[in-house]
Amino acid sequence: MNLLLDTHTLLWHSAGDSQMSATATALLKDSSNDLFLSMASAWELAIKVGLKKLAINGTYEVFLSTAIAGYGINLLPIAYDDCIAYERLPFPDPSHRNPFDRMIIAQAIRHKLSVVGVDASFDSYPIVRLW
């Protein structure tokens, strides 16, 4: 299965956080699944760590490179066609305007990826969300 991790999923899994569901943990540990992380998540983490709104273990660079290598994550670049899909994405939930989430959703749709994440607002879009 091809899985796109929501930003918090990477954070919680890396920290062994109890907020991770058993299903999500099993999906990430299953070596038959291909794991992807959007550059939108990498950017979101860089912003939050840089602004000191998010504390992680070590530096941003070490944290992310260790997670990518350790979990066998494929980085998903943001392509021009992803931006077109983002711009065309409807607002089924008017309160859900997070630009990072919306890029993850646009990429999940375009690349036919299931999203691993707790955020039920993703369910308003034509994607599969697993948790």
Image (cartoon, grey):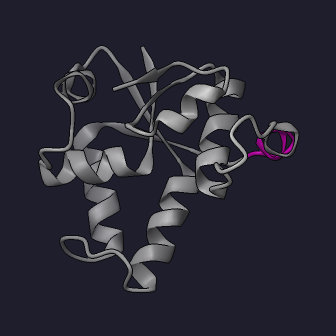
Image coordinates for residue 38, horizontal then vertical, percent:
54, 46
Question: In the picture provided, is 10 more to the left or to the right than 106?
Answer: left
Q: Is residue 74 visible?
A: yes
Q: Is residue 68 visible?
A: no
Question: In the picture provided, is 17 more to the left or to the right than 4?
Answer: left
Question: In the picture provided, is 76 more to the left or to the right than 66?
Answer: right
In the image shown, does 19 or 7 lie closer to the viewer?
19
Extreme-bottom residue of the structure: 51
Image coordinates for residue 98, horizontal then vertical, percent:
62, 56
Q: Quadrant of residue 23?
A: top left
Q: Magenta stretch: residue 82 in it? A: yes
Instruction: Give the answer, above or below, for where 55 lies relative to 66.
Output: below
In the image shown, does 14 or 122 lie closer to the viewer?
122
In the image shown, does 59 or 85 lie closer to the viewer?
85
Instruction: Give the answer, above or below, for where 81 lies relative to 30.
Output: below
Q: Quadrant of residue 56?
A: bottom left
Q: How many marks?
A: 0
In the picture, which quadrant includes the C terminus? top left
Question: In the picture provided, is 51 more to the left or to the right than 12?
Answer: right
Image coordinates for residue 2, horizontal then vertical, percent:
46, 20
**Residue at 42% across, 51% down:** 7
**Residue at 37% across, 37% down:** 118
**Residue at 67% across, 56% down:** 99
Magenta span: helix, strand or loop, mainly?
A: helix
In the picture, which quadrant includes the N terminus? top left
Magenta stretch in the rendered image = 79-85
**Residue at 55% across, 37% down:** 121
Q: Magenta stretch: residue 8 in it? A: no
